[in-house]
Amino acid sequence: MTTRFAFTISATDGAARTGIISMQRGEIRTPAFMPVGTAATVKAMKPADVRATGADIILGNTYHLMLRPGAERMARLGGLHGFMGWDRPILTDSGGYQVMSLSALTKMSEEGVAFSSHLDGSKHMLTAERSMEIQRLLDSDIVMAFDECTKNGAGHDEAARSMERSMRWAKRSRDAFDAGGDHAGRAALFGIQQGALDEGLRRQSADALIEIGFDGYAVGGLAVGEGQEAMFATLDFAPGQLPADKPRYLMGVGKPDDIVGAVERGIDMFDCVLPTRSGRNGQAFTRNGPLNIRNAKFAEDQGPVDPSCACPVCAGWSRAYLHHLVRSGEILGAMLMTEHNLFFYQALMADLRAAIAEGRLAAFASDFRSAYNYKARSG
Ligand SMILES: [Zn+2]
């Protein structure tokens, strides 16, 4: 019997940590970046190619999967892993954030969220109990508690009411997860801290979650439009309110420089659509900042996307070719741009892990920011 869930920190550097999460379907090196596999696919990438970029874990979206192909159908087909051909850990979100941002006619109550599908208008109800059931039917490895993402700009009282409801839903999530039989014996459950940008509310939320007890803790409610400065200001206190011996996950983050700053502040896990979605739109990440491959100046540029990148795309094809593919709307353009971007993100995580292990994170982060912001400075 292998370990259900264990987090071993091998080194720290300031507030940053590096280590390994051990689960039955494999190990997750932290700090970790999770590519987003919204609809049972990391768009434009086969699972083996996602793995080859260095990803130890991917993320699946409960909201999308419950609507299509449907959680019960997925269970009849043997769960998400076999269905999509990814045998390593998968984290699923609770659906709470996406139901509010994507579906129509939402009605929030203490019970949960009633909504109409953005696909066909069909009526659904998502509650803490149903979210846990769906994530169990998918056979998720890391299950996220059902919560309400407090909207950016909420005042103190509104943020407090929203956070308190999320804490009641966290308890219901814990109880429903624990009643999940075999699945509860092999999967992990993470709680989600809310409280907007307020240190006192974040503290109350952390204390409520710790009282319930979770395998890991997410910092929720950030990367919703507050900006990097406000996000970092919140991360100066929020991770430290959560247990030091459990993984801390910053949901929906982010840009490469967001990730570096969050790792410096004690975050262990990340997910974001940026490398995949923006890759399909022609944005490539490089150590000297992002570039838009559609730009005319790349039409005859025979160099690789990023000269410092060791990925198969940079080894095999030029900026000029990618420029042509993306401008022509060729499917291969989306595939190669996505592959490079995911490699870039995973190489960054590997560099962060090495820098923490060797006690030189501050120097690495300073050098990274200097190179990454070079173009912004030079105009
Ligand atoms: Zn590359």
Image (cartoon, rainbow, N blue to C red):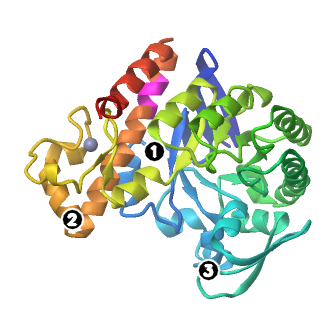
- What is the span of residues highlighted in magenta in the rendered image? 349-353
Distance of mark 1 from mark 3, alpha carbons?
Answer: 30 Å
Which label sits in the foreground, 2 or 3?
Answer: 2
Q: Is residue 322 left or right of residue 356?
A: left
Residue at left offset 60%, top offset 68%: 79
Is any atom of residue 30 visible in this view?
A: no
Q: Say left or right for 267 vs 196.
A: left
Q: Which of disc 1 and disc 2 is earlier in sequence? A: 1
> Can you give x and y, in whole percent of width and height, for residue 234 in the image?
70, 33
- In-image side of 241 versus 334 (left or right): right
Amino acid marked by disc 2: Arg
Mark 1 or 3, which is nearer the eye? 3
Asked if the residues shown at circle 1 and circle 3 are in contact, with their CB atoms under 8 angstroms apart, the answer is no
Residue 327, labelled with which disc?
2
In the figure, residue 211 lies in which quadrant?
A: top right
The answer to which of 190 and 1 lies nearer the viewer is: 190
- Identify which residue is drawn at 68% across, 43% down: 1
Q: How many marks?
A: 3
Between 65 and 90, the one nearer to me in the picture: 65
Give the labeled residue for mark 1: 55
Residue where numbered disc 3 is placed = 118
Q: Residues within 10 Å of mark 3 (few under 14, many from 20)?
A: some
Q: Is residue 285 above or below residue 273?
A: above
Q: Residue at x 35, y 34 (%)?
A: 376
